[in-house]
């Protein structure tokens, strides 16, 4: 069913393909998935009535909490058919385990191969992977197999340790890196301290994972601009999740992550689960095509984006996904102002006197949202607060509480026990948004 040419086909051809695959998927889960069998029965779903992609709006949506509460009811194959278990990071609550069959692993490899091709990947490239391959991390194994399927070379340095990363880059001539963007700032800092000329390194491009490098208008955000000002390599933003087993990756035009129409159906939904037209912001929902182990139908990711349907400069005609505005679940109502954590991240990333931070939301004694920012700074706490508070007041119109920490203390907050991802937002509210 894989067809990389479909991304360049007419919209009609893409829709015909997706409708055919959708019908096969609905029959498949209705026969094999305990969760969807029960869900369709509860909502009196007659699959014969799904005759077009527009009819998908009559199907119920699936949420993260559904997967957390009914994890194994999503499994559509026998235990013997499962060849790998991966899991979500658990930063948004109880981790979800995703079981993959041999065909799912092949699909994952194909997905990332196409993602790297979209990001100008070539067989002669040498990719240095600055992320973990262990701890059930799907992205690591996906990138690994995708690069191998591309035919490029791999350098598995893992996360952290700037000295090790630069040593491998210089010895092996890695021309491409796969990393979290904020770690690139640590690579830049190390390069400056050790007289490494960033403009003369072999690295020409970076596949950026886990953090946004662009604003809604596709211009680089503060993090992306800080990196580019010091190290002007080409950065490609990505969007993916463990549950959807598919990536949206930028081409060199940098105007949205490209949908792979043979692997996923993309919808942008309003609060009632109704599809929104291109250009309007809503919640990303995906329907996986070709997944055997744990397929998903209208899975609401919680991420707020918009869809772009115009043909891209690269020639691809499939929809593109905008940078993430924020997570629906993380939306904060603070003193009458609606705030998404990335807006605060962008401000703090711009300030040289803020070395590390964590934004925390919690419920105050009145039952409303309260904000606290945990900060590590080289300045005296009073001096930092005197500088930081007016900046926050002017940029987001409110001034959250500030709490100052040593470098080791902020590190403990950022990396709670059992997590594999750096935490920049703690949601300790009593009643989180659904």
Image (cartoon, grey):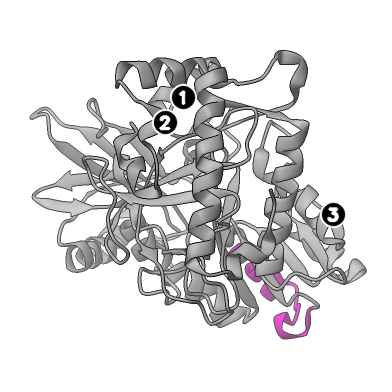
- For the residue pair 70 and 189, the one nearer the viewer reads as 70
Q: Residue at x 22, y 60 (%)?
A: 389
Q: CA distance from mark 2 to mark 3?
A: 31 Å
x then y, percent, for residue 251: 59, 72
Mark 3 or mark 1: whose residue is earlier in sequence: 1
- Residue with the most extreme right position: 171
**70 horizontally vs 181: left or right:** left
Mark 2 and mark 1: span between their CA atoms?
A: 5 Å
Q: Are marks 2 and 1 in contact (CB under 8 Å)?
A: yes
In the visual, does 47 lie left or right of 32? Answer: left
User: Helix, strand, or loop for circle 2?
Assistant: helix
Most distant residue in the bottom direction? 199
Mark 2 or mark 3, which has the lower sequence index?
2
Query: Dot 3 corresponds to which residue?
Result: 148
Q: Is residue 286 above or below residue 173?
A: above
Name the residue that disc number 2 marks. Answer: 64
Question: Which segment did they paint magenta?
Answer: 185-201
Q: Residues within 10 Å of mark 1 (few under 14, many from 20)?
A: many
On the image, numbered disc 1 is attached to which residue?
Answer: 67
Q: Quadrant of the C terminus?
A: top left
Q: Residue at x 43, y 33 (%)?
A: 92
Magenta residues, dominant SS class:
helix
């Amino acid at each position: 069913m894989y067809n990389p040419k479909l991304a360049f086909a007419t919209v009609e051809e893409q829709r015909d393909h997706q409708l055919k695959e959708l019908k096969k998927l609905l029959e498949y889960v209705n026969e094999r998935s305990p969760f969807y069998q029960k869900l369709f029965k509860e909502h009196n779903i007659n699959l014969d009535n799904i005759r077009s992609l527009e009819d998908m709006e009559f199907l119920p949506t699936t949420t993260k909490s559904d997967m957390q509460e009914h994890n194994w009811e999503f499994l559509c194959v026998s235990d013997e058919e499962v060849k790998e278990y991966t899991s979500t990071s658990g930063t948004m609550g109880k981790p979800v385990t995703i079981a993959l069959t041999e065909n799912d692993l092949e699909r994952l490899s194909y997905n990332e191969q196409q993602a790297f091709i979209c990001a100008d990947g070539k067989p002669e490239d040498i990719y240095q992977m600055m992320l973990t391959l262990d701890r059930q991390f799907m992205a690591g194994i996906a990138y690994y197999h995708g690069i191998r399927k591309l035919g490029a070379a791999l350098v598995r340095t893992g996360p952290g340790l700037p000295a090790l990363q630069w040593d491998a880059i210089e010895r092996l001539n890695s021309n491409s890196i796969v990393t979290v963007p904020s770690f690139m700032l640590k690579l830049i800092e190390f390069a400056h301290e050790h007289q490494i000329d960033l403009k003369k390194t072999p690295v020409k491009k970076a596949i950026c994972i886990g953090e946004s490098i662009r604003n809604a208008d596709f211009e680089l955000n503060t993090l992306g601009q800080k990196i580019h000002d010091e190290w002007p390599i080409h950065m490609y933003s990505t969007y993916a999740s463990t549950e959807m087993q598919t990536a949206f990756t930028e081409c060199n035009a940098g105007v949205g992550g490209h949908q792979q129409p043979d692997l996923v159906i993309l919808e942008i939904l309003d609060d009632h689960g109704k599809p929104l037209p291109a250009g309007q912001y809503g919640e990303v929902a995906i329907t996986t095509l070709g997944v055997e182990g744990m397929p998903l139908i209208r899975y609401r990711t919680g991420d707020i984006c918009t869809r772009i349907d115009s043909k891209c400069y690269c020639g691809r005609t499939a929809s593109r996904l905008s940078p993430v505005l924020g997570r629906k679940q993380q939306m904060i109502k603070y003193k009458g102002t609606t705030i998404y954590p990335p807006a605060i991240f962008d401000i703090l990333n711009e300030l040289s006197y803020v070395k590390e931070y964590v934004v925390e939301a919690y419920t105050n004694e009145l039952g409303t949202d309260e904000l606290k920012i945990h900060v590590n700074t080289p300045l005296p706490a009073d001096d930092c607060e005197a500088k930081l508070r007016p900046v926050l007041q002017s940029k987001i119109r409110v001034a959250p509480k500030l709490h100052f920490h040593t470098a080791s203390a902020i590190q403990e907050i950022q990396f709670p026990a059992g997590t594999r991802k750096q935490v920049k937002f703690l949601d300790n509210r009593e009643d989180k948004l659904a």
